[in-house]
Amino acid sequence: MLPLYPEIKPYARHTVEVGDVTKYQLYVDESGTPEGIPVLFVHGGPGSGCEFDSRCFFNPEKYRIILFDQRGAGRSTPHSEIAENNTQAIVKDMEQIREFLNVDKWMLFGGGFGSMLSLVYAEAYPERVLSLILRSIFLGTQSEIDWMYQEGVSRFYPDHWEDFLASVPLDEQDDLMAAYQKKIQGSNELVRMSAAKAWSRWEADCSTMHPNVRLIKHFTNPHRAMARTRIGLHYFSNKCFLSENQIIDSIDAISTIPGIIVHGRYDMLCPLENAFNLHEEWPISQMFIVREAGHSATEPALIDALIRATRDMALRFESDYKV
């Protein structure tokens, strides 16, 4: 199996100010080859921020690798803020970053919530997108949100689901979004942090085929868990700020943009059906089902498939760039 490329440091770091009333300072960095194929890494979550290995899916000799932490996430400030934080705002932020960096067209690379943002951006600005590499497809529909946080994944992980429900009174369990919102917005700091860790732990437990201690520790870090929970609840309680089935209904906008879809067969958080539905409506795309993988990009089989995807896209576009 192909491994990640070696870890590299950015050659440039930037702060991009966005927002109208609430001012956000977005962290942005660039690594790889300045004259290479521009690619934007669109992290998931919501609220996760980029990771130390986010740059490592791309050959640094071929790509100009651009990372950014979305509003309220990672190194962007204010941390865990939800005011003026919505899908449309992040899509505009992405376009502002493109203009700031003087990029004509770029590739988008996103997984989970990041795949949703990448698709919404591409449908809004198709003339600015070279191609898409999407993992673990999430389309932002209410049925997907219910599957993750009300009933669905719970049938496959009843032990972890029991932990997720442990602090929720029985009479509030028919609306877990509201129950967790109540906790995370309360005045008791211990209750807030306990809820944040439980929310993040649930996703970590369900993201991989085999338990991943490093991932669980990473997700339940107090600073990161609070952003993931506050911002995640904000988005999922508002149907990701999309109309139902918006992405599929607008798919004609990207009908000529090439794409590679990579999805783990045993992805319990974002069922394989999502990738099938997208591929069916976007026939120019290629779809690869990874047999020995779940949701997380940390799984070796998904890493292999994603490295192959970025390698294939580099071969397709490298003649247009000085690499």
Image (cartoon, helix red, strand yellow):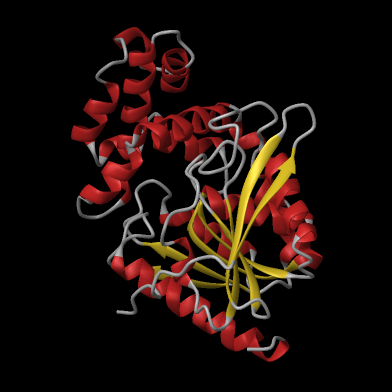
Q: Position of residue 268 (x, y in %)?
A: 34, 48
Q: What residue is at 71 percent from the left and 54 percent from the top?
A: 121
Q: Position of residue 59 (x, y in %)?
A: 50, 79
- Side of 268 relative to 317 (left or right): left
- Residue positioned most to the bottom: 319
- Side of 39 relative to 59 (left or right): right
Is residue 291 visible to us here? no
- Does residue 185 lie above or below 35 as drawn? above
Q: Position of residue 77 (x, y in %)?
A: 60, 36
Query: Which residue occupies the foreground of this view, 230 or 15?
Result: 15
- Does residue 151 lie above or below 183 as drawn? below
Image quadrant of residue 304?
bottom left
Image quadrant of residue 292?
bottom left
Q: Position of residue 24 (x, y in %)?
A: 68, 36
Q: In which quadrant will I find the C terminus?
A: bottom right
- Does residue 109 lie above or below 94 as drawn? below
- Side of 279 relative to 57 (left or right): right
Q: What residue is at 74 percent from the left and 73 percent from the top?
A: 256
Is residue 89 visible to us here? yes
Query: Which residue occupies the foreground of this view, 223 or 125?
Result: 223
Q: How many marks overall?
A: 0
Q: In which quadrant will I find the N terminus?
A: bottom left
Image quadrant of residue 235?
top right
Q: What residue is at 42 percent from the left and 58 percent from the top?
A: 52
Query: Which residue occupies the foreground of this view, 72 or 15?
Result: 15
